[in-house]
Image (cartoon, helix red, strand yellow):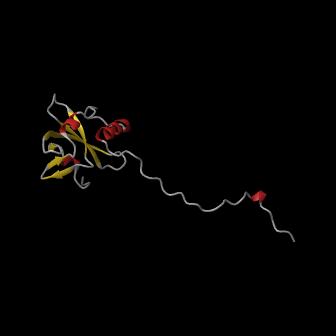
């Protein structure tokens, strides 16, 4: 999803699944703690007035509506953590697993080999006369 969209402008918009079926209306948007980028949306499904969390990363905003690339049944079965509270890292991980999204940490920076370390000062030998 584009990161230049103001998350407040998502609230109140309709959300649709991969097949074009209406999921519901966006109630809240959750930002990534580290980057401030919109990461999750809570969508009021209308089913017992429950909100379902949907990932914004793979979703698209088209013609003023959010299109989520997952089936409505999968979305409605997403873990329910309630709205209005901060999502913990463990809860986010559960959501990532539910949607089958990659949660692998970024690759480590390459380890550079700068050669052997110099021996400590007292063990160095000095050339003789």
| Residue 118 x/y as whole percent | 69, 60
Q: In this picture, is 81 found above or below 13? A: above
Q: How many marks?
A: 0
Q: Tell me which residue sits at (15%, 30%) in the image.
A: 47
Q: In this picture, is 67 found above or below 128? A: above
Q: In this picture, is 16 found above or below 119? A: above
The outermost residue toward the right is 129
Q: Tell me which residue sits at (80%, 63%) in the image.
A: 125
Hey, which quadrant is residue 74 in on the image?
top left
The outermost residue toward the bottom is 129
| Residue 123 x/y as whole percent | 78, 57
| Residue 29 x/y as whole percent | 24, 43
- Judge left or right: residue 104 versus residue 71: right
- Judge left or right: residue 12 versus residue 96: left
Q: Tell me which residue sits at (16%, 30%) in the image.
A: 49
Q: In this picture, is 112 found above or below 103? A: below
Q: Nearer the viewer, residue 52 or 76?
A: 76
- Judge left or right: residue 82 versus residue 113: left
Quadrant the C terminus occupies: bottom right
């Amino acid at each position: 999803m584009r990161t230049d969209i103001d998350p407040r402008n998502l609230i109140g918009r309709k959300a649709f699944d991969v097949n074009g079926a209406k999921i519901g209306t966006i109630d809240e948007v959750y930002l990534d703690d580290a980057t401030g980028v919109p990461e999750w949306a809570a969508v009021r499904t209308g089913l017992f007035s429950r909100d379902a969390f949907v990932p914004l990363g793979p979703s698209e905003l088209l013609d003023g509506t959010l299109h989520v690339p997952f089936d409505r049944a999968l979305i409605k079965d997403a873990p329910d953590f309630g709205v209005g509270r901060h999502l913990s890292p463990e809860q986010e991980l559960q959501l990532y697993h539910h949607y089958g999204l990659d949660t692998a940490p970024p690759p480590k920076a390459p380890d550079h080999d700068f050669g052997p370390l110099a021996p400590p000062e007292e063990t160095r030998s000095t050339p003789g006369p």
